[in-house]
Image (cartoon, rainbow, N blue to C red):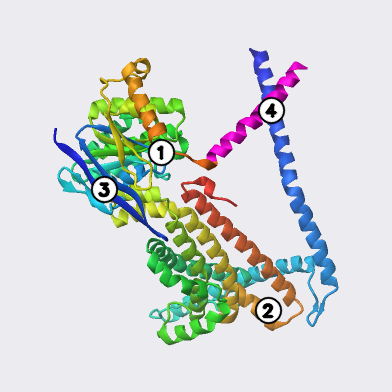
């Protein structure tokens, strides 16, 4: 008995070891090219950087940019401390005044210091998601309608083909003027710059979703349409049970494309609309023209790229959770 | 017995770029309640068109379909269709696929509990009650087709329309499905119209075999009454002279009277064997060495 357990354990240990080895080998095989690629990029980048002289000094290489990441983080921490002190002082002052005058209505004023890079990332994310979801709400029903009604599709398709390639920079001035004309209130709930960027994002990210959704709907197998006819499904049940599920894979393809477009567009829109996000950060640094500006913009470039990647992965995850046909979800 | 389903003098003309194409001409057939009718004919002779007109998926150019004294003008669950490639909704489970049909047909007439029982009963008829919560992608082709049949049966149709229901299945599964269908038919006594390419299947299952001429302007060539006692057993029938007589009559219709000459495929057929013979010779030579 004892011998067999020892024997079993040793074989299971061996198996575990084998598996670990296998995993290591696989990981190395997968990661090695990626690491090599990254290293090559860093070397080429630093070589190139050394040879580019701009009016703001040498183009920042990898080490300068890394240092700047640290600096940006330190700024963020310092700014947060300042804010905390500001609020502390207010509380103390209010307490003192209350002692002097018990009827005093105390107020807390908001800290209006500099936005840090993390604040800007947060603003950008909120803006892009608002714009994207507004686009989802418009585009998917529109896509369903266009897919279901061939004549409507014929009517709207030419317009879509024309609007689809329009750059956000062309929309933005129009959006800005319309928003300032239409959105008039003394105490605006939403910042105009935010609205401008958001609407621009919506306008640019609509089209991939509309087109893919309508394609998904139009390509429902005719046999399934016949099933629906034989069952005399009502329009609503027909859409809910047959059309939407059949179109789901393409709807998600459209949503992923749109989210990518939305993120790209957002940076440009923020630059021009002066919405306090990553785009404005880049623009401000460019205008600022300090010796660190280029390095800080490079930091923004990496942050923008990384967030774009995360957004795409998040979309993929949602698609995996929702899709009935798991094989339709690909990288 | 009174006529249940009357396919009355149907013409079908499809519009094409070069003018109308007459697919069907004067198709006329009266079917009694509980009768099992097979449509047989070469491919392209318009069998499916006849079925689609009865289903209401196509509108006949002339003539019409009368079910229980009323004209059929659109599809409906009282004429359930079993499609050639099952047509289950891939995003629904086996149970949900049947449920969709049952909810549609029996809403207001059955409560939730009765519907559940009815769905399970119909799936047990086709011996699929073990896989209620599987998706179509997780079951075999034969199983999918059985679920398709259960879905059609669950609508309690007046007429069951089957478009080559077993065409895509392998021979063994097909034989098994035919036996199941006969069993169900004996139990429920549905009126069935089935399209088939398979002569044995037609003789085994049908009360009448409707043989169609080649298109264009296809029509009913001959009708053969199959007067064999039920239940029918394929093994016993294989030796039965009457069965073989029916079989040869259908074969004679298809391959003598309505022989279809397809020049392109005959060239292929001639080439293949020659090639194979050459190969066979080579292997024989090798073996000899």
In this rendering, position of residue B284 left or right of residue B100: right
User: In terms of secondary structure, where does tag 1 sit?
Assistant: loop
Q: Is residue B192 visible?
A: yes
Q: Nearer the viewer, residue B199 or A286?
A: B199
Circle count? 4
**Residue behind mark 4:** B279
- The chain containing the residue under callout 4 comes to B
Residue count near mark 4 (Cα–Cα under 10 Å), binned few <14, some 14–19, many ≥20: few
Q: Earlier in the sequence, mark 1 or mark 3?
A: 3
C-alpha distance separating marks 2 and 3: 79 Å
Disc ID at residue B42: 1
Residue B287 within the segment the image draws in magenta: yes
Would you name the residue on which mark 3 appears?
B10
| CB under 8 Å between discs 4 and 1 | no
Going by the image, does B172 lie left or right of A237?
A: right
Q: CA distance from mark 3 to mark 4?
A: 52 Å
Q: Are marks 4 and 1 on the same chain?
A: yes
Q: x%, y% of residue B111?
A: 21, 41
Measuring from the top left, give residue B42's x and y in whole percent: 41, 38
């Amino acid at each position: 008995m004892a011998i067999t357990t020892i024997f079993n354990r040793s074989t299971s240990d061996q198996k575990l070891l084998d598996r670990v080895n296998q995993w290591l080998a696989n990981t190395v095989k997968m990661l090695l090219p990626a690491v090599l690629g990254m290293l090559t990029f860093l070397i080429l980048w630093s070589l190139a950087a050394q040879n580019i002289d701009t009016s703001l000094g040498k183009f920042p290489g990898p080490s300068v940019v890394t240092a700047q990441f640290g600096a940006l983080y330190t700024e963020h921490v310092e700014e947060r401390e300042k804010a905390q002190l500001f609020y502390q002082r207010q509380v103390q002052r209010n307490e003192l005044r209350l002692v002097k005058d018990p009827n005093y209505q105390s107020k807390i004023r908001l800290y209006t210091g500099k936005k840090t890079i993390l604040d800007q990332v947060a603003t950008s994310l909120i803006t892009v998601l608002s714009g994207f979801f507004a686009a989802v709400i418009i585009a998917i029903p529109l896509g369903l309608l266009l897919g279901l009604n061939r004549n409507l599709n014929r009517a709207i398709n030419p317009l879509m083909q024309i609007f689809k390639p329009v750059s956000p920079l062309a929309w933005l001035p129009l959006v800005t003027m319309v928003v300032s004309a239409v959105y008039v209130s003394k105490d605006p709930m939403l910042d105009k710059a935010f609205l401008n960027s958001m609407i621009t994002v919506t306008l640019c990210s609509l089209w991939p979703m509309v087109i893919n959704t309508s394609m998904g709907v139009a390509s429902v197998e005719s046999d399934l349409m016949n099933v629906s006819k034989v069952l005399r499904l009502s329009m609503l049940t027909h859409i809910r049970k047959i059309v939407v599920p059949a179109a789901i894979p393409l709807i998600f393809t459209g949503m992923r494309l749109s989210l990518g477009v939305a993120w790209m567009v957002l940076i440009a829109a923020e630059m021009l609309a002066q919405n306090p996000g990553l785009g404005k950060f880049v623009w401000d640094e460019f205008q600022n023209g300090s010796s660190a500006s280029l390095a800080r913009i490079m930091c923004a470039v990496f942050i923008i790229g990384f967030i774009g990647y995360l957004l795409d992965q998040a979309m993929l995850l949602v698609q995996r959770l929702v899709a009935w046909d798991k094989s339709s979800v690909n990288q | 017995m009174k006529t249940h389903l009357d396919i009355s003098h149907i013409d079908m003309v499809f519009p094409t770029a070069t003018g109308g194409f007459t697919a069907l001409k004067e198709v006329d057939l009266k079917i009694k309640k509980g009768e099992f009718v097979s449509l047989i004919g070469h491919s392209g002779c318009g069998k499916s068109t006849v079925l689609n007109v009865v289903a209401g998926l196509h509108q006949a150019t002339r003539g019409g379909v009368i079910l229980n004294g009323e004209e059929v003008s659109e599809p409906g669950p009282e004429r359930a269709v079993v499609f050639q490639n099952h047509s289950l909704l891939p995003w629904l489970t086996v149970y949900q696929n049947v449920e969709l049909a049952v909810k549609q047909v029996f809403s207001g007439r059955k409560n939730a509990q009765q519907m559940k029982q009815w769905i399970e009963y119909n799936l047990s008829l086709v011996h699929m009650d073990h896989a209620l919560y599987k998706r179509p992608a997780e079951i075999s082709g034969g199983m999918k087709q059985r679920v398709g049949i259960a879905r059609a049966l669950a609508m309690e149709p007046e007429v069951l329309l089957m478009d080559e229901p077993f065409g895509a299945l392998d021979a063994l599964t097909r034989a098994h499905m035919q036996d199941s269908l006969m069993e169900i038919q004996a139990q429920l006594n549905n009126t069935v119209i089935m399209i088939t390419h398979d002569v044995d299947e037609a003789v085994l299952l049908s009360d009448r075999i409707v043989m169609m001429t080649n298109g264009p302007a296809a029509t009913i060539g001959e009708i053969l009454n199959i007067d064999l006692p039920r239940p029918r057993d394929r093994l016993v029938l294989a030796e039965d002279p009457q069965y073989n007589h029916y079989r040869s009559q259908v074969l004679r219709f298809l391959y003598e009277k309505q022989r279809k000459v397809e020049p392109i495929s005959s060239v292929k057929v001639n080439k293949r064997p020659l090639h194979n013979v050459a190969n066979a010779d080579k292997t024989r030579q090798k073996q000899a060495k």
